[in-house]
Amino acid sequence: MTALLELSDVNVAIGTTALLDRISLRVDKGQILGLVGESGSGKSLTATAAMGLLPLIGGRVTAGTVRFDGQDLAAMTDRQRRALRGRRIGFVSQNPMTALDPVQRIGEQVDVVSRLHLGLSRQAARARTLDLLTQLRIPEAAAVAESWPHQLSGGMKQRIVIAMALAGDPDLIIADEPTTALDVTVQAQIIQILGALVRDRGLALLLITHDMGVVAQVCDRVTVLYAGRVAEEGPVGPIFAAPAHPYTAALIGCIPQEGMDKGALKGIPGTVPSAFAFPPGCRFGPRCARADTVCQQVPQLRSRGQGLVACHHAEDGA
């Protein structure tokens, strides 16, 4: 089966600095893939590459391929890529406060997507907007459509950004940390909405997050990034049951559990290294309690169970 979105051994550089190294992932229709890692791991840059937007930030793919529905993005013209974004690929940003135009009413901002990509009239576009707002559990949709962004809560703004992503009737949604700026209750509501959209519409969803708890709630598969490389990939259930990479295990260990004793929640010592100072070999090595001399060599992605892992000690258990 052809993947809807597939990155194969993608390297990305900005200027002379290499930031992503051999990134591979795939998202099929009807599937939710979680792309997880700490800040600086390369999640948003991977999404930028997937959308063909690297030139806007001075970046480029230096190796590998990015394919959407079997088509190589690099072989497309700028016009073809622009037509793809919004129409077949919808994007939900992590900050709804900056994603919305403060001097346009909400309805106008959603209307324009379906008018541009679906060719709808003003009247038909507004009807579609109100239908989308209702589907996203926004009460009094008509009144909200006439509102200004500053009149809405953060959770309501994020629903509007999701409506804008859906307005072009896309096949794939890329959601970049869509719950970061929201409180816990609203976070849960947004995650439920995104999961329901995939089930009800048969969409594909690439969900970018730093939170393994979110991955556990909604994702089918997960790709774990660390310092611009894939550390582990596979189905969510087996990875949570028995993570093969120490970094994956550490991320799972950061999830608060009900009834957890005080002080039992663990953090990960250290920070993700800068792209200007990546360590040799395994990039997680300086933070890993299990690192030894073999970790001075770059670990290759290899099969383990139903997924892949890049760790010299994976067979010993993470």
Image (tube, rainbow, N blue to C red):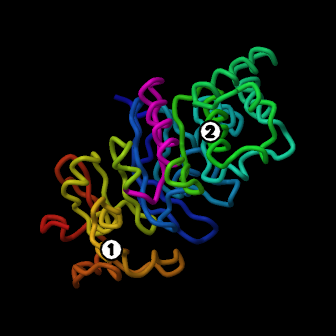
- Helix, strand or loop under label 1: loop
Query: In the displayed structure, would residue 285 be above or below residue 104?
Result: below
Q: Main secondary structure of the magenta part?
A: helix
- Helix, strand or loop under label 2: helix
* Residue 264 in picture, x, y percent from top left: 29, 74
At a point 44% along the width and 36% down the height, the residue shown is 195
- In the image, residue 133 lies in the stretch drawn in magenta: no
Q: Return the residue nearer the eye: 78 or 292.
A: 292
Q: Which mark is residue 266?
A: 1
Disc 2/disc 1 C-alpha distance (Å) = 33 Å
Three-letter amino acid code at the position of disc 1: Lys
Three-letter amino acid code at the position of disc 2: Arg
Q: Return the residue nearer the eye: 31 or 12.
A: 31
* Residue 8 in picture, x, y percent from top left: 41, 48
* Corner quadrant of residue 74: top right
Residue at the right extreme of this rendering: 103
* Corner quadrant of residue 243: bottom left
What span is in magenta? Answer: 187-212
Q: Residues within 10 Å of mark 1 (few under 14, many from 20)?
A: few
Which quadrant of the rendered structure holds the N terminus? top left
The residue pinned by badge 2 equals 159
In the picture, measured across the screen, residue 252 lies left or right of residue 32, that is left
Query: In the displayed structure, would residue 17 be above or below residue 28?
Result: below
Query: In the displayed structure, would residue 32 be above or below residue 258?
Result: above
Q: Residues within 10 Å of mark 2 (few under 14, many from 20)?
A: many
In the picture, measured across the screen, residue 295 lies left or right of residue 121, that is left
